[in-house]
Image (tube, grey):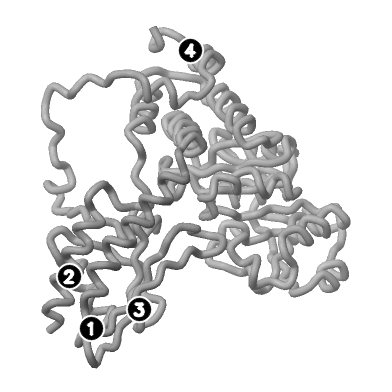
Amino acid sequence: MANRRTFLQLISQAPLVGGWFASSAVAAPSTKTPDYFASLGVKPFINAAGTYTMLTASLMPTEVMEAMSYASRRFYRLSEVQDAVGKRIAELLQAEAAMVTSGAAGALTCGTAACLTGDDPKKIQQLPDVTGLKNEVFVQKAHRYGYDHAVRATGARLVEIENAAELERAASERSAMMLFYNDADPRGQIHADEWVRLGKKLRITTFNDASADVPPVENLSKYLKLGFDLVTFSGGKGLCGPQSAGLLVGRKDLIAAARLNTSPYSDTISRGMKVNKEEMLGMLVALEMFIKRDHAAQGREWERRCGVIASAAKKFPSVTTEVVVPPIANHVPHLYLRWDDSKLRITPREVIQRLRAGDPAIEACPLTDDKQLVFTVWMLQSGEAELVARALTKILAKPV
């Protein structure tokens, strides 16, 4: 029986770990699960916004939860789990090595630490004191973003540049890493392929934060093939794994050093960014399920959901709709609704407030301006597009 074998025996016998759970029957619980959040006064909502961390990102498939439950029933040596899971992920993504991290932000910290310290125990213990260490991280000015704090947490100093000439002039023996924020590629003067070329020319490690950049599935290996030394992806967004997990993939020596800079090692900069065996296995199963998914069929379903909501909205005066797919991050259909508020006397902000206050509560995308209402449909569950359309119809029919 599977529960009598060790983790390593199991992982060596199954071509895809997710297959264990997809094909196995699960006994029904003997008692009804208590509504824990209701007892705490916390209400659920329909997610027509997307994989925002503040909205608890994505929902994990049953198979992922079963994998995590399976892992919780026995003790395993964490380093062996890390080795085995990392090896399988690396195989799936055609990488030299891989590890499960505490989200993409955790990957940024321990990955940067690896570039500063290598596998030197004294340097690892020294962080965030970077005295005597390579500690400069280059970043394009257009690529500065809220999550680069995870890089600065190591003690590294970000050095802003805007073009290749500036980068080459600034490179020195203190240069440790070149950070690339993938979603900002169109905004910077140095694009991804040139960033990699410059990194190799200057012998500086290149790190691509592609945290929100799946789907499409091809991106999981695209940036490694392009030549980046390290790449990170969020585990709890499009991959639908544990929200507190992420992937760090890339060069074998750097992944080894990144692991030394985090849990379970005590005196490290990322010790608090621990990942347990349940999250590691859950992340692996989520990744395998994502790779095997029928992405074309899923895309058609997203289009249908957009159509359901758009059809309901267009019945009202001056309402126009448009489906937009962002080119890089969150590369999924976004439904934009616009109208003349002199003809339909309600603002997008007011619609959002009324959707949020409804029963069931519905979350739309956060406002970027007051002229449009935006929904994403990829986190909706079966039948929820129709519920969103119904709620929207009710609000627009009685705007005041």
Q: Quick one: label 1, few (<14), some, or many (20+) residues within 10 Å?
A: some
116 left or right of 238 in image: right
Circle 4 — which element? loop
- Report, in whole angstroms, how far the alpha carbon at label 4 lies from the one at label 1: 63 Å
Q: Quadrant of residue 75?
A: top left
Question: Does residue 367 sit above or below 70 in this rendering?
Answer: below
Q: Quick one: label 2, few (<14), some, or many (20+) residues within 10 Å?
A: some
Disc 2 marks which residue? Answer: 393
- Report, in whole angstroms, how far the alpha carbon at label 4 lies from the one at label 2: 55 Å
Whichever of labels 4 and 2 marks the residue nearer the N terminus, that label is 4
Disc 4 marks which residue? Answer: 6
- Report, in whole angstroms, how far the alpha carbon at label 3 lies from the one at label 2: 16 Å
Image coordinates for residue 49, horizontal then vertical, percent:
34, 62
Tell which tag, 1 or 2, sits nearer the viewer.
1
- Report, in whole angstroms, how far the alpha carbon at label 1 lies from the one at label 2: 12 Å
Tell me the residue at 42%/61% (across/down): 333
Name which residue type carries label 3: Gln
Whichever of labels 1 and 2 marks the residue nearer the N terminus, that label is 1
Image coordinates for residue 363, horizontal then vertical, percent:
27, 63
Tell which tag, 3 or 2, sits nearer the viewer.
2
Q: Is residue 131 visible?
A: no
Tell me the residue at 23%/53% (across/down): 384
Circle 3 — which element? loop
**Viewer-proximal residue, 227 or 279?**
227
Name which residue type carries label 1: Pro
Disc 3 marks which residue? Answer: 372
